[in-house]
Image: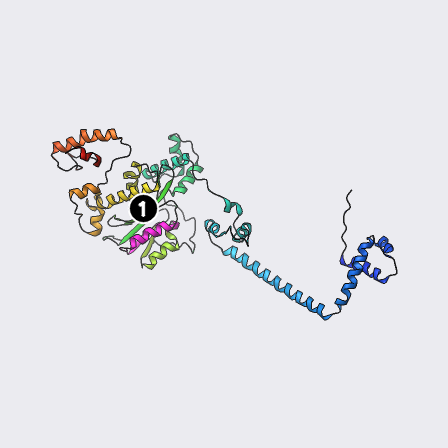
Amino acid sequence: MRNIRRGHDAAFKAKVALEAVKGEKTLAQLSSEFGVHANQIRQWRKQLLEELPRLFSDRRKKEDRDREGLLSELYQQIGQLKVELDWLKKNLRSSTKEKKTLVEPGYAMIAVSRQCELLGLSRSVYYYRSQGEDRYNLQLMNLLDEQFTRRPFYGVDRMVAWLNRQGHPVNPKRVRRLMRLMGLEAIYPKPRLSQSTQEHKRYPYLLRDVVIDRPDQVWCADITYIRMLCGFVYLVAILDWFSRYVLAWEVSTASDTGFCVRALGKALSFSKPDIFNTDQGVQFTSMEFTGSLQGAEIRISMDGRGRVYDNIFVERLWRAVKYEEVYLNHYSMVSEVRQGLSRYFSFYNRERLHTSLRNRTPYEVYFKQPISLNLEQASQTMHQIQPTFLSSQWRGVLWRGVLWRGFRWGGVPWRGVPWRGVHFYCFPEFFSAFP
């Protein structure tokens, strides 16, 4: 059985050492009496004799006073630091994403675990890396996006029922998560469930009963989801309310504030409105976005909670973008998304006629002047491009069997003009084959 080492307090050591200093008993007798080895008693006696002179010296008193003062100051600093640390944790309002950026893994003076503790961030959250969405979830997101564009009043329960009828047995939790990820929310008035914070100030809706009768009177902005073959991107657009003219747009792989601020900067580079209306998304309530508007002396207006019709014109723009551009193409790269949207917005502003604008284009209404394009310029700026699902064989059949005959029978000299009420696609690669 192992011997357990005993511990002795300071009073016991002093008592044994004093008996040894007296010399009335031998070390063997003291060892037997107190149950301590003779070598230990000898060591305690030596230590006592060395320390006795210092007890009565001024230097010892001074060292004790200095040590006590130093300890008192250190304890005071520790207490102050603890109070400040507790205050910092309580008042640090940074999001989890921002806290993760504050951690410095290469800083040798403070370990990563200690940095996470100081920031109030768990290490599991810091080291977590998202795996992204699988292919089936991306397919479901595309279906949800299409159905929501057709039926914006569909909520989670109706979307679940619709997907089940389409042969996708999914539960409400998955649909709710994907719709939140895409920023989709059914159109219906909702109760006031949360309060505004100082960082995210909400502004009142200024457009109720306001007559909008000129360009640059009201601008609006919104964000939507653009699907791709693998993944998705976010699109923000700034629209002139009166003319429907798209002033600026940006694409981003993350739904952050930066790309919204860049689009706003582009729009403000050539004009500015009296009122700027948005929804209450975190991108538009951020200090960066609202600060840019306030710096330009623009009045800020925000939709009511759940009131999608407060910003109905930009919602109508999203419907046009998706049905006339996004759903007709299958983007595989972000660069393809930008090229396709650039083509479409050029067509939307300069060529697409709006019945609400008396069959004029947004460009003509915004700039108050008609577009003067000759036939050659029009053929170069046409948006009706060849759909990706048409093979080269079908292109040849359409060109030889329909388009060319139509132009010859109708006597129309320019290729691409509607003939007898039918609008034909323009295929430039076949022009050189015919005189």
By what rule are the colours in the image chosen?
rainbow
Residue 209 visible in the picture: no
- As drawn, the residue found furthest toward the front would be 432
Q: Is residue 139 magenta?
A: no
- As drawn, the residue found furthest toward the bottom would be 58
Return the x and y of residue 132 as percentages of the image width and height. 43, 40
Quarter of the rendering occupied by the N terminus: top right
Residue 83 visible in the picture: yes
Return the x and y of residue 435 as percentages of the image width and height. 14, 34
Total numbered circles:
1
Residue 259 relative to residue 365: left or right: right
Residue 83 relative to residue 415: left or right: right
Residue 155 in the image: above or below residue 204: above
What residue lies at 30% left-to-right and 37% top-to-bottom?
329
Residue 65 in the image: above or below residue 337: below
What residue lies at 18% left-to-right and 35% top-to-bottom?
432
Q: Which residues are magenta?
A: 258-283
Q: Quadrant of residue 206?
A: bottom left
What residue lies at 79% left-to-right and 57% top-to-bottom?
43
Looking at the rendered structure, the secondary structure element under dot 1 is: helix
Return the x and y of residue 67 as percentages of the image width and height. 66, 65
Residue at numbered disc 1: 309
Residue 222 in the image: above or below residue 50: above
